[in-house]
Amino acid sequence: AFYSDVWHPFWKAKVNGRPVPVARANLAYKAVPILPGENRVHFFFESKALVWAYRFFGINALIWVAGIVVLAGRIIGAGNPASREARN
C-alpha cells in the first residue's frame, strides 16, 4: 500500500502503537519503518505553535460571541417598556 503526502519536520508517527521516526523520502514525502506483515500506521501533525494559535483564535471567537450576546441583550432590553420602568 502507498500513502503520498508532503514531509514536514512536525509530522510524527506511530506504527502498531509505538513511536517511530518520520524520514524524508524522495525529497518531499514521508517514510516510516514497518515490520513484515500487517501494520497499523498513524501519522499526526504536532506543532505547539499551531496548538497555541488555535487556542488564541478560539478564545478570541468566544469573546466576540459573548460581546455580541451582551450587546443584543442590551438592545432588546432597551426596546422593552417594562425594562425601562424597572430601571427608573
Image (cartoon, grey):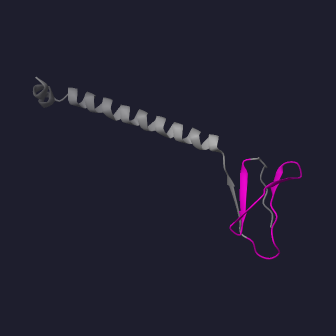
Q: Is residue 77 above or below residue 1?
A: above
- In the rendering, at what x and y percent does residue 56 appear? 53, 37
Of residue 44 and residue 80, the one placed in the foreground of this image is: 44
Of residue 31 and residue 75, the one placed in the foreground of this image is: 31
Task: Name, please, the residue furthest toward the right.
Answer: 26
Q: Is residue 38 above or below residue 83?
A: below
Q: Residue at x 76, y 75 (%)?
A: 38
Of residue 26 and residue 9, the one placed in the foreground of this image is: 9
> In the picture provided, is 74 more to the left or to the right than 34?
left
- In the rendering, at what x and y percent does residue 8 appear? 77, 47
Q: Is residue 61 magenta?
A: no
> In the picture provided, is 27 more to the left or to the right than 53?
right
Q: Is residue 15 magenta?
A: yes
Name the quadrant of the N terminus: bottom right
Occupied quadrant, residue 51? top right
Q: Residue at x 63, y 40 (%)?
A: 49
> In the picture provided, is 85 more to the left or to the right than 49?
left
Occupied quadrant, residue 83? top left
Specify the segment rendered in magenta: 10-39
Task: Name, please, the residue furthest toward the top.
Answer: 88
Q: Is residue 62 above or below residue 31?
A: above
Q: Residue at x 88, y 48 (%)?
A: 27
